[in-house]
Amino acid sequence: MAVNGRRGMLAKIHIAKKDLGLTDADYRHVLTINYNVESAADLTDEQLNDLLNLFKQKGWKPLRKDVPADGNRRDSKPPVPKDRQPLVNKIEALLSEKGRLEGRRVSWKYAEAILKKQGGPDYLNWATVQQLENVVRALYYAVERIKRKAGG
């Protein structure tokens, strides 16, 4: 396999690790138990494929590469003006926390659905500061609701 193909597979593995919410210790445990290595770089091409398939069996779904009407990938952080960046960072953190608590990846589409349900535009990068603050508030309450259910 070409170097770019191998690099691409390694990149996918690390994306899957993040999306599945694996800690470094958990990830290294998977590598040690299944392949007797501590780094994916030490795997053969066949083992890399096998590891990707293992992550898919555990629920990881590679994201599609289609591009929406606004020209931005909705599975990545939307580009916003500097004054809105802290709010988008907070949304990203809350999406990550919600996903960690639920044991799955929560995409940017979820935040955009909240924005749209609140009467805002289709995309986060089109939202005003107030609209982004409302999304942050809704995500915060969603995370707190999950924590309350888990704790009691």
Image (spheres, grey):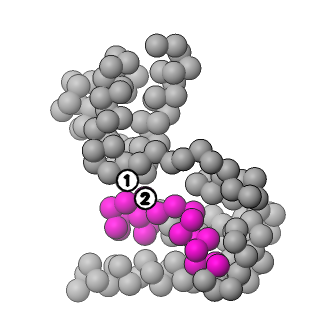
* Mark 2 surroundings within 10 Å by alpha-carbon count, few (fewer than 14), some (14 through 19), many (20 or more): many
Q: Which residue type carries mark 2?
A: Arg
Residue found 50% across the figure and 33% down from its top: 11
Most frequent secondary structure within the magenta stretch:
helix
Q: Who is closer to the viewer here, 37 or 119?
A: 119
Question: Residue 68 falls in which quadrant of the image?
Answer: bottom right
Q: Who is closer to the viewer here, 68 or 15?
A: 68
Res 136 visible = no
Give the residue number, with chain letter if any, for mark 1.
21
Residue found 81% across the figure and 63% down from its top: 81
Task: Please say if 72 is above or below 84.
Answer: above
Residue found 61% across the figure and 71% down from its top: 112
Whether the residues at callouts 2 and 1 have beta carbons within 8 Å, the answer is: yes
Q: Which residue type carries mark 1?
A: Gly
Residue found 37% across the figure and 53% down from its top: 21
| Residue 124 x, y percent position in the rendering | 69, 68
Give the residue number, with chain letter if any, for mark 2.
105
Res 70 visible = yes
Tell me which segment is drawn in magenta: 97-116
